[in-house]
Amino acid sequence: MSLGTPFTYLTAVLVVGITVVPLLFTALGGFRTNAQINAHPAGIPHPWITSNYTSVFTSAVFWQALGNSVIIAVVATALVLVFGSMAGYALSRYTFRGREGIYTLFTVGLLFPISAAALPLYLLLRQVGLLEHLIGVALPEAAFSLPVTIVILRPFMRAIPGEIEDAAVVDGASRLGFFWRILLPLSRPALTTVGVLAFVTSWNAYLLPMLVLSDPSDFTLPLGVAAFQSQYTQDTARVLAYTAASMLPALGLFVFAERHLVGGLTGSVKG
């Protein structure tokens, strides 16, 4: 066994501890009472209390925020997949002047967080009348997810052998037919990867929904968590339950698509 193996395992344990322990603390804290949390903040529920989660899952406010988050995340993810796949196809399979410059422009977009464009984006959305609209959140989130989408899709699509495209052309397929019938199915791992990343990024977004939405009925789950925490400041157990419940859809999506995520990222690196 090499010297690097123990270090690798130690690093893995530290990463798991940093990422998983807070999730467990949040999830288990929802099954405790405030008295238990105050007495032993990191203890195991004894007895297990389900009333906190019951009150969250029977709350109309939670389900309304969940529905808003789903709408925004689904619309943003769909836009990312549609426009990202088309741009990735053009930048990987076509040769034209300025292609590398356009790809570099998308790459540079990774350096600019959404907070850097908060003020001009707010003014633009106000000018076009998209404030207080869910689509006003979904469109910018899709735009800010496009750079990483292009960075992943372009090398993956570029790595698909040209002989496959030549064979499709010989069989009478047009460029659009090759893109729709052959390239997209072969790029499914990468598409799944960028889809999950776009969905989770949109799901966890806080700054943009806060700028665009002010009506509590339009709040997404991150805004709902903040509002819930402000309303129930002293009820730590219920706040932890609400927070844990808001994480379930994103965690479930990650678990479901884990294999495709690894395959898509591996393919993009090889490309």
Image (cartoon, rainbow, N blue to C red):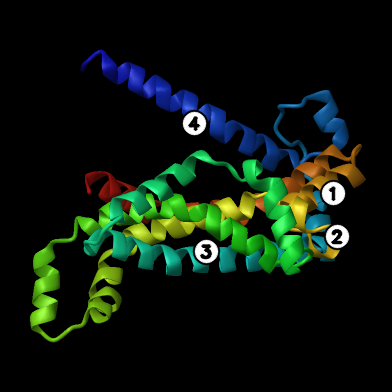
> Which residue sits at x=65%, y=68%?
71
Residue mark closest to the camera, 3 vs 1: 3
Tag 1's secondary structure? helix
Check disc 4: other Cα within 10 Å, few if <14, some if 14-19, many if 20+: few
Q: Which mark is residue 227?
A: 1
Between the residue at mark 4 and the residue at mark 3, the CA separation in whole angstroms equals 28 Å
Query: Which amino acid type corresponds to the residue marked 4 in the rendered image?
Result: Val
Residue mark closest to the camera, 4 vs 1: 1
Residue 50 image position (x, y, % from top left)? 78, 50
Residue pointed to by mark 3: 77
Residue pointed to by mark 2: 216
Q: Quadrant of the N terminus?
A: top left
The mark nearer the N terminus, 4 or 3, is 4
Please, is residue 147 above or below residue 41 in the view?
below
Horizontal relation, residue 50 to residue 101: left or right: right
Residue mark closest to the camera, 4 vs 3: 3
Q: Residue furthest front?
A: 97
Q: Nearer the viewer, residue 71 or 171?
A: 171
